[in-house]
Image (cartoon, rainbow, N blue to C red):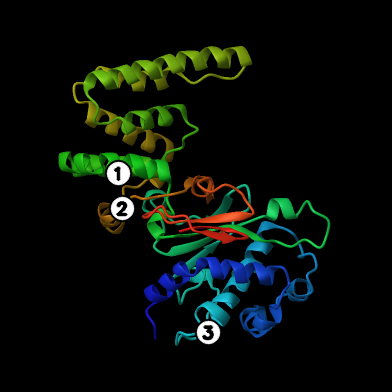
Amino acid sequence: MTDSYVLREHVKNNLPGIVERLNQYLRGEGVEEIKSILQRVGRGGKLPHWYELLATGQSMPNLDGKTIGSVIEMTLLGVLERHTLSSFKIPPLEVNPAKGVDIPLLGLGVKSPSENFCTSEPFFSAYERVLGNESDAVILLTDYQTAKKNPPPVRIQIIKAAYLRGSEIADRNLCMIASKNKQMLYEESESLCKKMLQFLCHINQQDWRAKSLLRLVNSLYQDDAALNELVNAIEQDFQRKLKDDIKKGVEPNSTDELHKIIAIRDSNQKVSTIINACNDWVIENHKDFARLPNDNEWQRFLKSPLDGKIGMSFALQWRYNFGNLFSLLPFSPVASVINHEAHAAPLISDFEILD
């Protein structure tokens, strides 16, 4: 059987054609071509409840994100099996997120945010925030937000698409900060480097002290004078926010939060003091939840390109924000294919692909 890497590369290289065919089916054109596939992967070996409506170009049922995601996943699988991968000797494809990846045979995930750029995904480990996923994914941006406002029949279309390696499905800003400090901090102290990774993966950027510490971690290897200036600027920000909160009748942050930042200014060992202050924040706010990286996560971090391309925050689930990714491309009836390495932009039609 063909190696899954070869199959994923074929999907990646043929993404424009895949999206074109997928949009055709989502408009109700030629859906009978994949009817048998949809029946096979449908619950209980039956056609999905939305098939007849889709095939006749009518409004999709229950216009909610979960339903649309299911329609897109199953229809995409039909495109891949019937067209894109038909020349390869592979067994029938299945959609099975329970196995940890949407299309297990390919080792490929499918994510379908709409124009708000966000999706929610199951939460497994905080370290995914910097390390990303262990599987690649196709990201299909839909016009769901616009389409649901239109009178029926409502037809969902893919307006932009991207193929992301697993490591790219990580927080862009946090990866940049980790990459900036990784080598020097590791050489100085493996323990401190692990604490930095722990902080970046567990940070709540709505928290004033955490956000202030992130500013310091971003400038970790500047000289002492520059770091002291940054602490001064953070102190001034605190005082401004304190006055604003009092005027608004909002309970202000405790001055103890500020004192924990000011203590960094008085230290002669800036790097270790900043990282240990980050560790203190993690322990105070997350307690037992915020463990240090295990051996597998640590080895992945040391080898990782740290090339995250999206925004990620978490509560009970991950909230993925693909705004950074798709903001590289304007919405337009004529679209561009952008290659990260070559920066080439050949024209295609109807939708946009980011590779």
Vertical order, 14 against 30 (above or below): above
Q: Are marks 3 and 1 in contact (CB under 8 Å)?
A: no
Name the residue rendered at 73%, 72% in the picture: 28
Vertical order, 174 against 73 (above or below): above
What residue is disc 1 on? 179
Q: Is any atom of residue 154 visible in this view?
A: yes
Q: Which amino acid does the dot numbered 3 rest on?
A: Pro
Left/right of residue 345 with respect to residue 190 in the rendered view: right
What residue is disc 3 on? 92
* Mark before the other along the chain sequence, 3 or 2: 3
Name the residue rendered at 49%, 14% in the picture: 240
Left/right of residue 51 with respect to residue 96 in the rendered view: right
Q: Which amino acid does the dot numbered 2 rest on?
A: Pro
What residue is disc 2 on? 305
Residue situated in front as seen by the camera: 27 or 247? 27
Q: Secondary structure at mark 3?
A: loop
Q: Are marks 3 and 2 in contact (CB under 8 Å)?
A: no
